[in-house]
Each structure stands twice: as structure tokens, then as C-alpha cells.
Image (tube, rainbow, N blue to C red):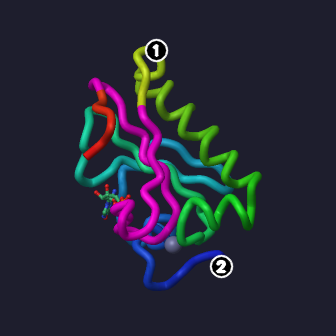
Amino acid sequence: MCPVSSDCLFCSIVLRSVPATIVHETDSVLAFRDINPQAPTHVLVIPKAHHSDAASMATTDPALAGRVLDVAGQVAAADGVDAAGYRLVFNTGKDGQQTVFHAHCHVLGGRGMEWPPG
Ligand code: 5GP
Ligand code: ZN
């Protein structure tokens, strides 16, 4: 882990050098709308500190992983999708279709989800 990584897209969003539609912020967590939404609600919740994926974040700083999950629930409630239900996803690694290697939780809601995902 390092505080920020100069070549990381989501670190750049934390630093405000790349714009994003921010919906929630704490001292350690940022939530912003996905640029290519896959559902009516599609928000990414990230730790401000750079961790390459969710597992390494949870190992290095389990309290931070808990705060990411807490904010994910708050985002779902703020978007009004908590009553109907929603999905939290941490894509991890190549087979998990992770494309941005800064840990992030997808909050997806506002439509019925399929299982298993494709
Ligand atoms: P992953 O595939 O790594 O699990 O998810 C990365 C997500 O980041 C994708 O859903 C993608 O649409 C989103 N994304 C990629 N570039 C940007 C960006 O510049 N801004 C925002 N807000 N989302 C982005
Ligand atoms: Zn980063």
C-alpha cells in the first residue's frame, strides 16, 4: 500500500486531477458514479489510500475495508435502492475482470440482478 500512486486512475480521482461525480466522502473513503453505468445505480466506493485490490486492502487495513463496506451501504440507502436490494462486487484480478487496480466496490442497484453473473 502507498498513500497514492502517480499512475493510478482512481488515485487521480482522489486527488481531483481526474473529474468524477462524487456522491459520498469521508476522511478515508470516496464514492463516485461509474463512468459506464451497468445499472440505474452504479457507484464505485474506494479507499483513498492505494491498495491494488480488495483482498490486499482487507489484509493490510481491515478497518478500512469495513469502512468501504459501510459507505457502500450508505450510498445504496442514499440512492433509495436499499429496500429493494442491491449488489456489491469486488472484481479481483484478470479472471475477475478487474480493470482498475485500485481496490473498489461496485454498488449496483435499481434493477433486478442475474445470478450467476456472466
Ligand atoms: P473493474 O472492471 O476494475 O471492476 O471496474 C472499473 C470500473 O471503473 C468500470 O466499471 C469502469 O466503467 C469504471 N471507470 C473506468 N474509468 C473511469 C473513470 O475515468 N471515471 C469513472 N467514474 N469510472 C471509471
Ligand atoms: Zn490508486
- Is 104 in the magenta? yes
* Rendered location of residue 39, percent (x, y): 26, 36
Label 1 packing within 10 angstroms: few (<14), some (14-19), many (20+) = few
Residue that label 1 marks:
83
With 59 as the anchor, is 4 left or right in this view? left
Location of ligand 1 given as a quarter of the image: bottom left
Q: Quadrant of the N terminus?
A: bottom right
Residue 89 or 8: which is nearer the viewer? 89
| Disc 2, SS | loop
- In this figure, which residue is indicated by the disc labeled 2? 2
Instruction: Label 1: state its secondary structure.
Output: loop
* Residue 96 at x, y percent in the picture: 38, 60
Give above or below for 75 relative to 4. above
Horizontal arrangement in the rendering, residue 41 relative to residue 118 (left or right): right
Q: Are marks 2 and 1 in contact (CB under 8 Å)?
A: no
Q: Which residues are magenta?
A: 87-112
- Of the two numbered discs 2 and 1 on the same chain, state the one appearing first in sequence: 2
